[in-house]
Amino acid sequence: MDTVPTTENCRYCLMCRHVCPIGLVTHLETLTPHGWGLTIESVKRGLLTWNEETVNVLYSCADCGACRANCATDQPLPDAIASARAEVTAQQLAPAIVYEIGEILEQFENPYVKQTPEKMTGTGAVALFVGDEAHHLQPEAVQAARTLIHATGVTPVEIGIGRNNGYLASSLGFPETARKLAQATLDELRASGARKLLVLSPGDYFAFNQHLIERLGLAWPEEVELIELTSYLHDHSKAGRLTFTILEDTTPYAYVDPAHAARVPGGRAGARAILKAVLPIPARELFWRGERTHSVGSTALQFTQPHLADQLTFARLDDVAKSGAQVAVTEDAGTLYQLNRHAPRFGVRAQGLYELLAKNIQ
Amino acid sequence: MTLLFPSEMIRSELEEIVGEHFISVKETDKLIYSTDWSWMPQMWLDRGERLPAPDYIVHPGSAEEIAEILLIANKYHIPVVPWGGGSGTQGGALPLFGGILVDTKRMDKILEIDEKSLTVTAQAGINGQQLEWALNEKGLTLPHYAASSNCATLGGYLAPRGTGTVSTKYGKAEDLFLRMQVVLPTGEIIRTAHVPKHAAGPDWARLWLGAEGTFGIITEATMQVDYLPEARLLRAVLFDNLSNAIEAGRLLMTRRLEPFVIRLYDPESTRSQVKKVLGYEFDGAYMVIGFDGDPDIAALQEKKALEICTELGARDLGREPGEKWWEHRYDFYYPPKSLHLPWMYGTTETLTTYDQIEKLYWAEKKAVEEGFAEWNVKFIGHFSHWFHWGVMVYTRFIIEEPPADAQEALQLHNRVWNAAMTAVLENGGMINEHHGVGLKLGRYMRRQYGDAWPFLLRLKKMIDPNGIMNPGKTGF
């Protein structure tokens, strides 16, 4: 991918800095979209070289998509940064942890456990992409999702059980590994015969709807409709095919827009609506929501810059605490995992959306 | 990185003030902070040339920390460059002589929103758009809609006397200002009076409006806010005659119709910029007019305005071209729609009274177009900030094939600016209306103020005896 026009355009543009979560928590001009663009372009001009310091800058971008989502000319800066990371990894200049995770991804297809993905079984009209985050970090969410989908009269074929969707590898700078992972899922999808693929999070939606095509150069099968589970459930709920018991407890909840939410237009309307179906009082809205949503530290940053990743998660939990909510609810396993790690110190509790809904099906 | 002995001594002292996480001497940070949004340093880096960089980049967390930093700067006679969003177009934030760059963005707290008096008090490093979102949550707005709001800070609104899109009704940033806290170059922390309109002596609080960090660092400000308007009515009209269009704008203002926006593009801008960004192919001068607030009053104001425009020969284009402009008004600043390198460009915006504005516009256009015809220079402009007595014209020059050599390019840039500013000064104009003076226009300050300039120099000497604050800017 030719990323020159993007970094040329972004190096002196300041128009998305207000939505960059890294810029907000670090206050450092270098760690903003234009800082990354200018760093990459300065290396090309010989004003900087890739070394420990500049590579550290390059790996400080969360690859959350907020910059592009708020760009009037749709500059794919995260793709350009991933492309620069690929150059750096190829030159053996990336941090050691990058190669470590890259090797684990190559061998086990997920970064969390040394265990290869489970084989898919059966065929059907509807498939569910389980992925690695939900399978390994939040298995309760997968079970809850099964329960919810069954309640709509559907038994999906599960694919990608324990496999990364390819995004993590490309974000780290390993596009070939990313292609292999994404292709493996595409192969399973084809074998399943499904015409609908349900995904559990906006991260998975982005991975197949945009990342796979634009960053990896692969093709999505046109005959398959990609649907987020939250939208699917909301549609069934609206049609009266799925009903929930409203909670008696009036503990205030807040919906946390998951990682990559900025990359999926629509402001999480489906997730918000389905949450509303079980809450006795409206969920609190956070300051950083919808189009200006900020990610927790669940992207590649959790491996390359754990301190920075934690700062992002702290910021989200601080936002929840300031809203007066006591429960932070979200559907994405990776987001939930990060929220769970730190929630107690902010006096709040993290809750999976699917688990909450599954417990209250009528 | 390794520092020489005295540099490390100073770095250590600064670190003791702000903490180890809030000081940087890294090469990457130095390079990134060596440029702001002005064309000159961007071009310089684009051609692979290095710029003067700060020696230390600090992120203080309070006015008290800034005060201590300034004491160190005075002790060692080191320059201090305040930095907000870095979105200035005149090089006002460039660390020309190295020193300590004070990035204020860590000071980003909203301290109070007073919903009775309709004011907001915030630390000066808060991002403009984030402040706006926080106000919007309460149904309020800070009606300073600058094109740079996504990146500029509250301090950056005030320091160069910025103007936003809706200034025609709500005023410049300085008109929305009630009070501020400032750290003086000598390290004292002071506050201006609680309210701005009084008769308790001279209006000294305004000294820091337009000083661009040369008189100290603004650390907190209280601003007037408004309720979000119930209605915003926008429409566009097209004049075949720029003169009539300016007259229409004058009448809208002098008859007190209170438009929140009058954006008049000259025929060249209409042909190029409006077509490129909005997709309209109009022949003439495209004008967007807007009225807001109570829907009934706004509708009546719009009706009267439309009558004035049509009487002067305008064709009503309806709502869509007005609303589309409003929705996409900042798209003009996103690359590749914006002016961009390797082009050469400059915004020589100016203002004067209605009796001189046309003469000034044509004189500047002639000076630039005829003076630099060999470079195929383009001269475009729009009239966008209107007052009861006059109007600002946002004139710009563009050379799409400038010299490749950085030094030659900068020399040509300075020559074009010189021609434009000479025309401005000879025709009753100010050297700018809202972009500030920075580095680029400093050399015109003496000509702008004539006999008053030595007084300003004495004032600077008194406020900043060691000359540490943002040296080389605003002519100081």
Image (spheres, coloured by chain):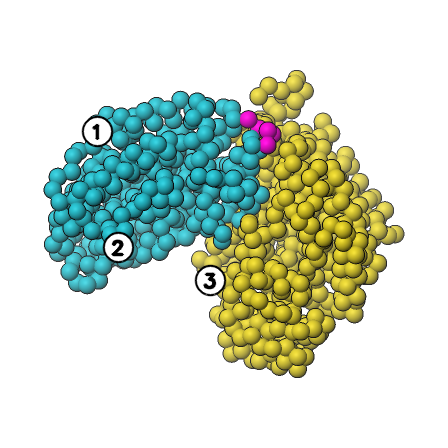
Chain colours: A cyan, B yellow
Q: What distance separates the C-alpha of mark 1 from that of mark 2? A: 30 Å
* SS under mark 1: loop
Kind of residue at badge 2: Ser
Q: Are marks 1 and 3 on the same chain?
A: no
Query: Callout 3 environment at 10 Å: few (<14), some (14 to 19), or many (20+)?
Result: few
In the picture, which quadrant includes the C terminus of chain A?
bottom left
Q: Nearer the viewer, residue B301 or A118?
A: A118
* Residue A304 horizontal/vertical position (percent): 40, 29
In the picture, measured across the screen, residue A118 lies left or right of residue B361, that is: left
Residue that mark 2 sits on: A231
In the foreground, B206 or B168:
B168
The location of residue B189, given as percent across then percent down, is: 65, 41
Residue lying furthest top in this view? Answer: B5
Residue at (78%, 60%) from the top-left corner?
B366
The stretch in magenta equals A45-49
Residue A190 circle label: none
Q: Amino acid at mark 3?
A: Gly
| Residue A356: % across, % down | 21, 48
Circle 1 residue: A116
**Quadrant position of residue B69:** top right
Q: Helix, strand, or loop for circle 3?
A: loop
Of the 4 image quadrants, the one containing the N terminus of chain A is top left
Residue drawn at the location 57% of the way across and 21% of the way down? B1
Q: Is residue B154 left or right of residue A127?
A: right
Residue at the disc numbered 3: B139
Mark 3–mark 2 distance (CA, rounded to whole Å): 30 Å
Q: Chain of mark 3?
A: B
Q: Quadrant of residue A236?
A: bottom left
The three-letter amino acid code for the residue at tag 1 is Thr
